[in-house]
Image (cartoon, helix red, strand yellow):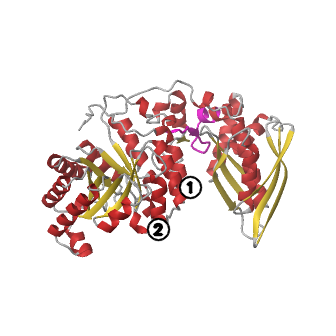
Amino acid sequence: MAESDIPDNQPFVRIFDTTLRDGEQTPGVALTPEKKLQIARQLDRLGVDTIEAGFPITSQGEREAIKLIAKDGLRAEICALSRAEKEDIDAAIGCGVSAIHIFLAASDLHLKYKLMITREEALRNAVEAIEYAKRHGVTVEFSAEDATRADQEFLVRFFRSASEAGADRLDIPDTVGVMTPERMSNLVTKIYSACAARISVHCHDDFGLAVANTLAGIKAGASQAHVTINGLGERAGNASLEEVVMALHELKGIKTRVNTRLLYETSRLVSKLTGVIVQPNKAIVGENAFGHESGIHTHGILANPLTYEPFDPSALGRARWLQAGKHAGTHGIEAQLKAMRLYPGREELKEIVSKVKELGDLGKRVTDSDLYLIAVNVTKRDRSDRDLVKLVNLEVKTGVGITPIAHVELRIGEKIHSRTEVGVGPIDAAIKAIQSITSGSANIRLKEYRLDAITGGSDAPAEAIIVVEDKDGYTASARAIGDDVVVTSVQAMIQGINAILLKNIPSTYVTRAETKSSLMPPGEEIDSK
């Protein structure tokens, strides 16, 4: 749902994205300034209200990244993290940000064992830091670290002092993810009623409750959510931006400025640049979120997508897809074949479904190319004219101290096209060459690649399975088996390209108009605080 799609009379929540700060604290993740700027630009396109660009005191490279983002002319508020120390605040101000996120521990556990200061010292340090930052004309958000394990009466006093010192926003961090929705609701209600500043919630996912706690906090009065793309963050991560936003839009009737049609694209970019893979069954942006194999499900989806989908995947810039396999039914297989422009008779269709299930029973993933081959064999159709792209020649060069390079020649229609590319290995170089050749006629990218040895030994045949995706989010899968891993991988890639070029998905995967329906449970009330 784009911002323009949201009625003006609905409540509004700010989205504070901390992918570049808390998200980068994911173990093993380290982003260069250029990568951080690339993500920041995408977050700005996405429509987040605040981008927490980093923690300036951390390193020179961190400061360079924040400066790049701050001077890039983005619409979002650019924020930097700071301890309640003058040195940190000066470093943040020196980066040219418009907002500073100051934090100081509130729990006795942190005060005694980490900071070794008293509650009164913490109060004084927080007030002095906030007042100092405000004198420099920046927006200040104050976080009471480990707030959810702090003494609540002291926490109220802590936040009230911060608000009186000039803090524009007060953040309640569930630093180690120990809250439940009920407890979060009660805590936010208490802080909300005691302080005049806008309330934020920052929830970690140690018990898998970050999104639920964030939603509970918003219902209780918080009007800003701290989130990260793909739920990145320390330990088990933070509340996932895509899950929080979609739950607000679709289940609570609460709007944000986020253009949800860019969520999937943003998720993929962050995954690529951080190297953190999104689990296939992750909500909203997981690869399987709109995939269907079960015969009962595919039958329902083909009749009306809302039978087994909570909302239209196009709202995320995504597309549904059907998977052939041992759980598949006649309706789903028939729809997939129609997408390949194959129309078997009733008995032929039964035989195709039977062979698909046989392959699935062997523990095999049934790719689109597998299904196509089964169908043409059963129907005895000539498949020679179905390959729109054909491999003419492949040459690769690799070795120690040699940059891997591949030269590929493809026949597309009546013309032969060639391209030479380099890569991290010969397979990568060859795939890049294929994508470069076909980019003019079909913007297709490699989405998934797997290579397995079928038997033991250095001469074992290789099995390559790939999934490709076009510019509209539609996918196709293919398999190839051979002795040479490079040639086999290339053949699988070309089969996948042919499979997706042959598909006519929109007219076959959705047989009825998408039905709009409210997803809010009956009796659900919207709290407009």
Q: Taking the image as drawn, is residue 290 in sight?
A: yes
Q: Position of residue 477 (x, y in %)?
A: 66, 46
Which residue is nearer to you in this view: 179 or 457?
Answer: 179
Which residue is nearer to you in this view: 420 or 462?
Answer: 420
**Mark 1 highlights which residue?**
272
Identified at 43% across, 55% down, the residue is 19
Say what amino acid the circle numbered 1 marks. Answer: Lys
Which residue is nearer to you in this view: 361 or 374?
Answer: 374
Q: Taking the image as drawn, is residue 480 in sight?
A: no
Which residue is nearer to you in this view: 91 or 307?
Answer: 91
Identified at 29% across, 66% down, the residue is 86
Q: Against 435, is 429 above or below? A: below
Mark 2 or 1, which is nearer the eye?
A: 2
Q: Position of residue 74 (x, y in %)?
A: 46, 46
Label drawn at residue 60: 2
Which of marks 1 and 2 precedes in the sequence?
Answer: 2
* Secondary structure state at the residue bearing disc 1: helix
Say what amino acid the circle numbered 2 marks. Answer: Gln
Identified at 64% across, 35% down, the residue is 336
Badge 1: few (under 14), some or many (20 or more) residues near its Cα, within 10 Å? few
Q: Residue furthest top?
A: 513
Identified at 74% across, 70% down, the residue is 457
Badge 2: few (under 14), some or many (20 or more) residues near its Cα, within 10 Å? few
Label drawn at residue 405: none
Q: Against 39, is 519 above or below? A: above
* Secondary structure state at the residue bearing disc 2: helix
In magenta stretch: residue 56: no
What segment is highlighted magenta in the picture?
316-334
Q: Position of residue 8 (x, y in %)?
A: 34, 29
Quadrant including the C terminus: top left
Quadrant including the N terminus: top left
Q: Position of residue 187 (x, y in %)?
A: 20, 52
